Amino acid sequence: MLRLNKGGIVKKILIFTAIAGIFLSASISIARTKLVALPERADVVIRLDNPNYTLVEEERILTLQKGTNQVDFSWTGVSIDPDSIRVKIISHPEEVKVISVSYPPEENSLVWQIYSPQPYEEKIRISYLLKNIDRLITYKAIANKDETNAILQSFLILRNFSGEDFSMAKILLDYGETFEKSVSHEETKQMLLFTKQNIQIEKKLTFDARKLPWDPEKVTGNVGIPVTYEIKNEKKSGLGDFALWGGKARVFQDDGKGSTIFLGEDNASFTPPGEKCSLYIGDSRDIVVTQRKIKEIKINIRKNADNQIILYDTDEIIKAEIENFKDAPVMLTLIQNIPGEWDMEETSHQYEKEDANTLKFNVNLKPKAKETVTFHYHRRNVR
Amino acid sequence: MKKILIFLGIIFIAGSTYAKIDLVSLPERDKVQLTIYNSADLTLVRESRTLTMKKGENKLQFSWANTLIDPTSLELFPLKETDKISVTDLFFPPRITGLGVWNIVSQISGKVPCEINYFTSGISWQAYYLATLSQDEKTMKLEGYVKVTNRSGEDYENAQVRLIVGKINLLDRIADLARRYPPYGRPFEPKPLPPSEKRGEVFAAKAMMMEAVDRAVIKEIEKEGLSEYFLYTIEGTETIPDGWTKRLLSFSQDNIPVINFYKYDESRFGKNVVRFISFKNAKSHLLGKEPLPDGLIKVFKIIDKNERLSYIGQDNTKYIPIDQVVELNLGPVQDVKIEPKLMEVKTLNYQFNAPGRNISGWDEEQTYTVKVSNYRPIPAKIEITRKFPHQYWTIENKGDYGVFEKLEKDTVRYTMELAPNTTKQFSYKVTLRWGDRQE
C-alpha cells in the first residue's frame, strides 16, 4: 500500500475509519472494506530517549459517527511492533471508548472498535514502537592551546530507514533541544543538540605495564604512551543536569592561529551527572618508559617429603626508567600489577592501591628529565 | 579535477520535506588548508568560501561524488555575522550518495564568508631521509624530506599544507566512512561496505600546473609542538592535483657527529654482528630543533675527494623525540667480528634428596672467551649482550672487558671501544645454580 500526498511524502502507515455494523459480517472475521475518512496526522513526536527503541506518537482527528466505529490502522513496508500500539482518546475521554482491538490474519494492521455516543471530531493519540529509525549521539570538542578547557558540541543524528516519511515531526531526546523537522525515509539528519563553552578538561598520560611492552628497544616502532582527556559531567562545565549519552567524540585543538588540528577520537561512554568521561585521543611518543625486572628469586622455600617445592615466597625488584623528552612538565601515571598475595618492601615513589593487585604511581616529570621508579616486593605463599 | 561541488539555493517549494533546489551560485574556494596526518589515512580540510545568502531559509548543497570525504565530519559555519546566520541542520537526502544539504536560516542577504571543514582520506605524507657519512665516518650530513601524495580524488589548488607528526586514536578508517552509504549506516543492521572504487585516472594536463610552481626559492617548513603532536607548516601554498606527489626539503644539516657502533646479541640478531650508526637528535649534534618523524633512511658514504658515494644500507627509523639518541640499524657486517667461545664446563656442589637417592641440586661453571676484532680503519664502539637461562647466577670477568653492567635479572652487557684494526679478548666465568642450589 503506497500513497503519495501533495508534498510527495510516502505514507505507509494508513488509518481509515468506517462505521461498524454495516460491515460487520456474521462470520468471526471482520470485513474491512469501505473507507469513510483518511484522517491526517496532526502532531507527530519521535521520541529517542531509549537508545534501542524509537517511540512514535501521532495525533489524528477521527470523524466518528454515533455508535460503534471501526478504525483500521495498517502499515506496509514499515516495521511496527504490533504489541506496542496504544491509542489514547483525547477530546472526549469520558464518553468515547475503545471497545476492542482485533488483528486481522496475515496483515500488518489492526482494527479498533470505538464507541462514540454522538458524532464527534475526535482527537486521538496513537503511539507505537517503530523499527529501523534510531539516533546516534556524536560529540565534537575543541580544546584550547593549553589543553585546560574545551568547547563541547553534541549532535543528534536521526537515521530514518523505517519506510515512513515524517512531515514536521517533533524529534526529541531526554535532554537538549526539541527539533521540529521533516524527515524522509532513508534520510539521515544531523542536528546540533548543544554547545557548551569552558568545559574543564584534564589531560592524563598512563603507562600500563600490564598492556604495554616493557623494553622499547625490542619493539619495532615507537611505544606510545596513551593520552586521555577527562571531562566531568558537572555544573561547573555547564553540564551536570542530565546523563550524557555515549557516542563518537572527535577532539580538536585550537592551534592559536585561527585554525585547529585534529587530536583524535574515541567513543564517549554513557556519563551520568557527577561522573567522568575518559577519551583516549592518541599517544605521546615524547615520554619513553623502559621497565625491567632486575631481581626475581625464590625465598622461604618449603618442601614436602619428596623434596618437591610446595610453597615459597619471592624476592622481586622492578625498575622503570622514565624519560621526558618534552620541554614541559608531565604527570605520568604508572600502572603496575603484582599477582596474588604480596608485601611491599621498599619503593622509590609513593603509590596508591587501585585493587588487591594493581598499583598506581603518579610520577611528576620535570621538563627534559629522567626519573627512575623502583619497587622491591615479596610475593607470599606462592604454590 | 574538481569533484567537490557546492550549490546554494533558495527553496521555493513550501513543501516540508526535501525538495530539489534551484541553483543560484557555485562559490569557489577562497582559501584551503590541508592538515595531513602520517599515522592514519586522514586529512583535515578547512576551506573558506563566500556564500551568497538570501534572507530567510537557504539550502546549501555539498556534493563529493568520487572523492574520499567522510560525510560524518562535514561542518559549516559562518566566519562573519555569526549571530545572524544559523545552520539548523545537515541532512543526507534519501537514495543519493555523495550529497549533503545544510539548512541555513539567515537574517541578512548578501555575501557571507563561511568555512567548510571535513576529513578526507587519500592524502598522505611520509618522511624520509638521506644520510651521507664523511670519509672518516665521524660526521654525517642528514637531509630530511617530506613527501605529500594526493590520491583523494580532489585537486587542491593553492592550499596551505600542514603536516602532523603524531599518533592519533581513530575508531574507524576514514576511507571506510567515505565509502559508507548511508553516511551514518542504517539502524540495527550493519551493512557490508561496497567495494572500493577503482580509481587511477591520469591527469596529464595537470603537468602544466606542476611546472608552473616557482622552484627558485626552497620553501621553509615551520615546526611547532601542539599537544602530544608536532605540526609542520609549509611556507606559502602548494597545488597538489589528484594523483600527484610532492617532495619538499624539511631540513638539511651537515657535520653531525656520529658514533659507529656494533652490537652482538644472540637473542635479537643471532650470531651476527650488526652495525649501527648512532647520533643524538640534540643541539649538541646540530639537530634537536624538532622531533624526527619515522621514515626510511638511506645511508651513503663519501669514498673519495671527489665526493663519490658508496651505499651502506637503509633502516626504518622510529619517531625520534628531541634529545633522544638515534640508533640506525644498518644490518650485519663482516668487518667487525665478535666470537664468544665456550672454553670450559664444570659441575660441582652436588646435593642429594637423601643419601643414596636422586640429585637435587648442583652448580655449573661455564667459562667463555670472547674475541672482539675490528678490521676497519676507524674506531668502533662495541656492545655485547649475554643472556643466561635463569636468574640464579654469579659472574667473574677477566681481561679487557670494558664496562660491565647487569641489565636485567638474566641479562648482562659489556661495552668497549676498539681502536682501528685491533683485536681484544676477554673472558667470563658464569656459575649457574640449578635445583636446590637456587635456595
Image (cartoon, rainbow, N blue to C red):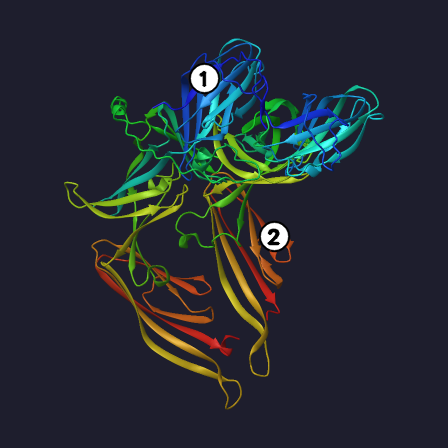
What residue is at 52 percent from the left and 90 percent from the top?
B355
Residue B322, relative to residue B406: is it above or below?
above
Q: Position of residue B387 (x, y in %)?
A: 40, 65
Query: Please, what secondary structure does the residue beneath circle 2 have?
Result: loop
Q: How many marks?
A: 2
Which amino acid lies under the numbered mark 1 shown in the image of this protein? Phe
Residue tagged 2: A350
Q: Position of residue B328 (x, y in %)?
A: 32, 49
Q: Position of residue B266 (x, y in %)?
A: 34, 63
What residue is at 49 percent from the left and 86 percent from the top?
B358
Residue B223, relative to residue B360: is it above or below?
above
Q: Residues within 10 Å of mark 1 (few under 14, many from 20)?
A: some
Q: On the same chain: label 1 and label 2?
A: no
What residue is at 68 percent from the left and 23 percent from the top?
A35
Is residue A207 toward the left or the right of residue B219 in the image? Answer: right
Residue tagged 1: B7
Q: Nearer the viewer, mark 1 or mark 2?
A: 1
The answer for which chain carries disc 2 is A
Please state which of residues B317 and B62 is positioned toward the viewer in this rendering.
B62
Residue A305 figure quarter: bottom right
Is residue B384 toward the left or the right of residue B310 in the image? Answer: right
Query: In the image as oriented, which residue stretches furthest toward the front?
Result: A26
Q: Is residue A348 visible?
A: no
* Measured Cα–Cα span from mark 1 to mark 2: 62 Å
The answer for which chain carries disc 1 is B
Query: In the image as oriented, which residue stretches furthest toward the bottom?
Result: B356
Which amino acid lies under the numbered mark 2 shown in the image of this protein? Gln
Residue A176, relative to residue A329: is it above or below?
above
Q: Quadrant of the N terminus of chain B?
A: top left
Query: Is there CB contact under 8 Å for labels 1 and 2?
Result: no
Is residue B67 toward the left or the right of residue B302 in the image? Answer: right
Residue A315, relative to residue A138: is it above or below?
below
